[in-house]
Image (cartoon, helix red, strand yellow):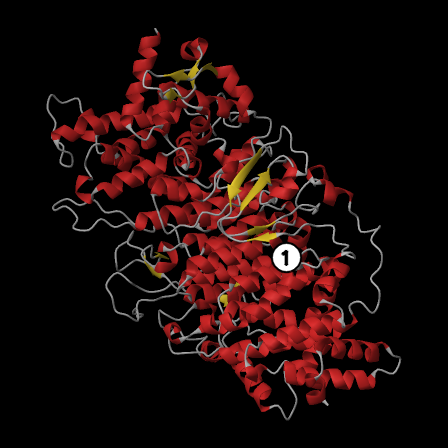
């Protein structure tokens, strides 16, 4: 029967089959169609253009395919744009209309909407994205374009039953053909270099393009595709293949084999982990997640007998995170199980490392809300597997971009993010996978001596950190924490907080700097790029995200909980600084109720105080044998883009310690750390055993300047009492004045330099721009790196209040000097603060410039 149908004209055959299928008794038509599809969609024949032609004619039911497409589009009831774009596409973002900071608009929707006077920008997409016009969960309705504001779907006529009848019959077979081809083309080789996945993908490209073409027909066709992709019964019937189909059976076995390695812990590792769960001498390379569950006890085991598998010096015992199987779902690390086409399609998309065509197809389906919910759950189900695959990928940059291309469309919607957090344990999965990723690159900390050392840190020289491979996961984590309902759930889950403390403790003491005293270093390590990026992205940024939800008195319990767990995990104390500040300033908490005892305060003070002393040493040329990279670290620490997460909290911590410790003890500790105690003797002569004579004066100057900063800086500490910090407007004004006093500034440069604004606007772009780290990806989706929402602050109003504008000037050569802002006269008279200038300068010449300008004014 199939042979006779194949010999006939495609148009007449399709019309004949459609007519048969429309009958009440359509069994004959069904049998003929299945026989025809068995022949046409035979995966053993490979990618066949003739098969696509047959599919087009069959879907159209005898009509021309183009005419069929136009007819289906006329029944488009979609209310969302959903246009998907790839890298280098020019799109728009309107912060006035956006509910989510990641919202994006295509040019057509932006131009057809009313954004007059709005805060918007045009950007060139680097990871790809999708248009959010029409999605009220991501942007305000006032920003919708005319087409999506008026379209509600109510005026669209219902789809005739027979229009998509053939699509419902043919497409399940078409999709299983793609899946079988993906199964057949994938092998699990000894090394990734042996794979020729691109060849498989190239042959499948016409098929995926056809699916993508179908999604562009509008909501009616997407509804049909959604039903097919999520139908469990159809998947069950077609997935295993017929008994007599040897090819399908063989591919199904290959699929089951591929599934075995899909969990964070493979079947073999799980068996070994359970067998050795009671052992104390687990090899260093064995991950802690080989134990089922995901609740960290966050304790170190005695690892004195453990040796690193590669035996290299400096790579030591791994930190074991004991996991309990009692409170968390072990399925987080289990192998995957699929129930529908969509789940297996995503699985192979991951296995083939996110081919662009497949990503685009999956995203093109998102305007269908039923699909979006199911796909988001499926994505979360595969999340651990995605990150496991990313860690092994040789093209991690490309794969990272495409992962975020998908995840940002899913997690920017608060309702959807809350839904999968509650139903699918999204937070548990993310934090567990973060631990899993970092456990692969842990080494012994060098802060303590070899014998007593029990702390481990991440190795910043590992590819995972050097290449910023973890950033898609951290980016997603920050994205979902921007939603208040999700952040609240995180702060209420104490086991999650413990897991998070364990994760952040891996970064405390990483990339330790040791001063070279004899010879200049032969090779200047660039690992500090990775260290600074990790501290900002993986540690500080999530903290600031949580902090935005701890602004009112009703949330003070969250602050107490976080600080309590931070104190229990001493290495995490520094990330609690922001919570203490807001707890006192916004939530009415008493500082004494948050602080530990005197002995612990003394210990906590040591690390940030040593950093301030080291800064002074670097400026005194005591670290010159360490090369230029150490100066780069000192500059980055105080740089305006990063100071909110680095020097400012450290200064605040030291101010708190100074206010609660014995003054004599604190002052003596400062002078000891700065190595200038001998200079303060009353004897006529002194002898400094540590500093050379030319280093004594700059170090003493550094110590005294530090004390002045402690006494004068009021960004977090109150001006008159401990519970009063500077208001948002006051901070913005002080930041702006300090930058203008150094030099006249253009509007754009001032906007970039004023660190207060970067509390809500900094992106990963600055990590690359300031650190010159080429391996760091720059997403166009903003993730607040530090600080709080500006609130009532208006940049333009404040700029007008403190500065005068000097109009552009044409120079004799024909070039034009840009317009500049310069401080008003009363700003020089009343508001110039040399200490604030010192705190915000990277180069000493900028301090001198400010002092010279101040002197010139008078």
- Specify the quadrant of the image occupied by residue 315: bottom left
Seen from the viewer's position, the closer of residues 233 and 678 is 233
Classify mark 1: residues with Cα within 10 Å, few (<14), some (14-19) or many (20+).
many
Residue marked by disc 1:
421
Would residue 755 appear left or right of 463 to someone viewing this image? Answer: right
Which image quarter is the N terminus in?
bottom right
Which residue sits at x=15%, y=37%? Answer: 690
Q: Position of residue 754 (x, y in %)?
A: 45, 29
User: Which corner quadrant holds the C terminus?
Assistant: top left
Q: Tell me if 737 is positioned left or right of 521 in this view.
A: right
**Which of these two is toward me, 149 or 804?**
149
The quadrant in which residue 180 appears is bottom right
Identity of the residue furthest to the bottom in this view: 244
Q: Where 610 sits versus 135, above or below?
A: above
Residue 286: give x, y in percent of width and height.
Answer: 40, 71
| Residue 49 at x, y percent in the picture | 58, 74
* Left or right: where 76 falls relative to 335: right
């Amino acid at each position: 029967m199939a042979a006779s149908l194949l010999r006939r004209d495609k148009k007449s055959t399709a019309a004949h089959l459609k007519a048969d299928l429309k009958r009440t008794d359509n069994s004959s038509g069904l049998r003929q169609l299945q026989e025809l599809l068995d022949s046409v969609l035979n995966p053993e024949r490979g990618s066949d253009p003739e098969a696509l032609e047959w599919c087009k004619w069959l879907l159209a039911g005898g009509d021309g395919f183009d005419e069929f497409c136009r007819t289906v589009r006329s029944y488009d009831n979609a209310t969302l744009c959903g246009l998907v774009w790839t890298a280098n596409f020019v799109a728009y973002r309107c912060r006035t209309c956006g509910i989510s900071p990641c919202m994006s608009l295509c040019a057509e929707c932006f131009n057809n909407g009313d954004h007059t006077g709005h805060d918007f920008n045009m950007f060139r997409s680097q990871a790809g994205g999708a248009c959010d016009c029409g999605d009220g969960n991501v942007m305000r309705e006032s920003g919708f374009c005319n087409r999506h504001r008026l379209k509600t779907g109510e005026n669209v006529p219902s789809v005739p039953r027979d229009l998509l009848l053939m699509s419902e019959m043919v497409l399940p077979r078409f999709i299983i053909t793609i899946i079988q081809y993906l199964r057949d083309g994938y092998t699990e080789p000894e090394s990734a270099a042996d794979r020729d996945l691109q060849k498989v993908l190239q042959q499948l490209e016409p098929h995926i393009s056809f699916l993508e073409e179908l999604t562009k027909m509008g909501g009616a066709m997407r509804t049909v595709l959604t039903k097919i992709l999520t139908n469990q019964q159809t998947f069950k019937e077609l997935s295993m293949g017929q008994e007599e189909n040897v090819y399908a059976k063989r591919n199904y076995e290959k699929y089951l084999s591929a599934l075995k390695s899909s969990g964070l812990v493979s079947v073999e590792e799980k068996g070994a982990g359970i067998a050795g769960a009671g052992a104390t001498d687990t090899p260093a390379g064995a991950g802690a997640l080989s134990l089922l569950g995901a609740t960290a006890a966050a304790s170190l085991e005695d690892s004195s007998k453990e040796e690193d598998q590669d035996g290299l010096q400096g790579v030591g015992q791994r930190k074991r995170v004991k996991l309990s199987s009692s409170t968390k779902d072990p399925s987080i690390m289990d192998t995957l199980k699929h129930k529908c086409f969509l789940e297996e399609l995503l699985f192979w998309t991951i296995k083939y490392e996110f081919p662009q065509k497949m990503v685009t197809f999956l995203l093109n389906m998102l305007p269908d809300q039923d699909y979006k919910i199911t796909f988001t759950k499926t994505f979360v189900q595969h999340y651990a597997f995605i990150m496991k695959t990313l860690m092994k990928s040789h093209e991690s940059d490309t794969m990272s971009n495409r992962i975020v291309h998908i995840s940002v469309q899913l997690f920017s919607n608060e309702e959807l993010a809350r839904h999968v957090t509650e139903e699918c344990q999204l937070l548990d999965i993310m934090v567990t996978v973060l631990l899993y990723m970092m456990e692969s690159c842990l080494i012994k900390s060098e802060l303590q001596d070899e014998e007593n050392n029990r702390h481990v840190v991440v190795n910043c020289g590992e590819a995972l950190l050097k290449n910023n491979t973890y950033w898609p996961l951290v980016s997603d984590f920050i994205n979902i924490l921007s939603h208040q309902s999700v952040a609240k759930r995180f702060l209420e889950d104490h086991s999650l907080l413990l897991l998070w403390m364990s994760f952040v403790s891996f970064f405390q003491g990483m990339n330790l700097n040791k001063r070279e005293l004899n010879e200049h270093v032969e090779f200047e390590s660039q690992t500090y790029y990775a260290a600074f990026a990790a501290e900002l992205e993986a540690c500080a940024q999530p903290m600031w995200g949580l902090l935005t939800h701890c602004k009112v008195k009703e949330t003070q319990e969250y602050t107490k909980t976080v600080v309590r767990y931070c104190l229990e995990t001493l290495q995490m104390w520094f990330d609690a600084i922001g919570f203490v500040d807001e707890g006192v300033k916004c939530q009415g908490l008493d500082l004494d109720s948050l602080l530990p005892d005197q002995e612990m305060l003394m210990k906590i003070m040591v690390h940030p105080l040593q950093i301030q002393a080291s800064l002074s040493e670097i400026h005194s040329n005591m670290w010159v044998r360490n090369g230029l990279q150490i100066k780069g670290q000192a500059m980055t620490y105080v740089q305006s883009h990063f100071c909110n997460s680095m020097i400012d909290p450290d200064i605040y911590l030291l101010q708190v310690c100074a206010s609660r410790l014995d003054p004599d003890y604190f002052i003596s500790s400062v002078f000891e750390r700065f190595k200038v105690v001998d200079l303060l003797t009353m004897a006529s002569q002194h002898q400094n055993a540590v500093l050379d004579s030319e280093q004594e004066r700059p170090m003493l100057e550094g110590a005294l300047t530090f004390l002045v900063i402690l006494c004068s800086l009021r960004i977090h500490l109150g001006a008159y009492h401990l519970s009063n910090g500077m208001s948002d407007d006051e901070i913005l004004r002080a930041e702006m004045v300090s930058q203008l006093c150094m030099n006249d500034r253009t509007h754009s440069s001032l906007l970039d330099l004023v660190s207060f604004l970067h509390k809500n606007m900094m992106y990963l772009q600055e990590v690359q721009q300031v650190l010159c780290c080429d391996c760091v990806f720059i997403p166009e989706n903003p993730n607040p790196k530090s600080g709080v929402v500006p609130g009532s602050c208006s940049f333009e109003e404040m700029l007008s209040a403190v500065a005068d504008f000097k109009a552009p000037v044409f120079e004799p050569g024909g070039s034009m000097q840009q317009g500049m802002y310069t401080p008003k006269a009363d700003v020089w008279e009343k508001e110039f603060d040399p200490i604030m200038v010192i705190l915000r300068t990277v180069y000493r010449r900028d301090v001198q410039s400010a002092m010279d300008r101040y002197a010139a004014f008078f």
